[in-house]
Image: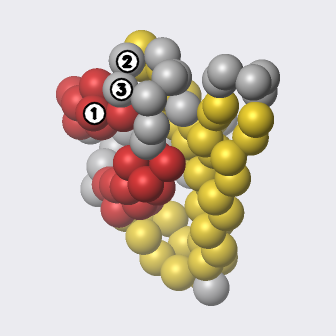
Amino acid sequence: QHYILSLKLLISVRKMCGIFAYLNHLTPKTRSEILDLLIKGLKRLEYRGYDSAGVGIDGAAGNSQISLVKSTGKVKLLEERIHSMKDDLNFDGVHTVHVGIAHT
């Protein structure tokens, strides 16, 4: 089973932020697949007016640590930063239970 949550939150009259979350339970996914899903979710929420984006996912070793990746600019810059960190983020690691959240 997996669940996808997508929200747009009104911060002020002029600015909005988009939040996309993903939870999977007993469905094996590589960290690369999970990060790609989070990025695709952000791209669906993409609009003008935000100045940064980021993701938070379970630690690369499957422990209680959280891996955070942030970037200024558009979602594409965040995606490039994530791919430049593929070794640190353990792209090939497989998780059967996972939580991730992404924001603009």
- 52 vs 9: above or below: above
Asked whether the residues under the numbered discs 2 and 1 touch, taking CB atoms below 8 Å apart as contact, a structural biologist would say: yes
Quadrant that contains the C terminus? top right
Residue 74: image tag = 3
Quadrant that contains the N terminus? bottom right
**At 50% across and 23% down in the image, what residue appears?**
49
Q: Which residue is mark 1?
A: 76
Asked whether the residues under the numbered discs 3 and 1 touch, taking CB atoms below 8 Å apart as contact, a structural biologist would say: yes
Residue count near mark 2 (Cα–Cα under 10 Å), binned few <14, some 14–19, many ≥20: few
Q: Residue 86: image x %, image y %?
A: 26, 37
**At 31% across and 49% down in the image, what residue appears?**
91
Q: Which residue is mark 2?
A: 73
Of residues 73 and 54, the one drawn nearer to the viewer in this rendering:
73
- Of all residues, the one furthest to the bottom in this rendering is 1
Q: Residue 14: image x %, image y %?
A: 67, 21
Q: Secondary structure at mark 1?
A: helix
Q: Residue 20: image x %, image y %?
A: 60, 51
Would you say 10 lies left or right of 94 here? Answer: right
Disc 3 marks which amino acid? Lys
Disc 1 marks which amino acid? Lys
Asked whether the residues under the numbered discs 3 and 2 touch, taking CB atoms below 8 Å apart as contact, a structural biologist would say: yes
Residue 57: image tag = none
Q: CA distance from mark 2 to mark 1?
A: 8 Å
What's the coloring here?
secondary structure
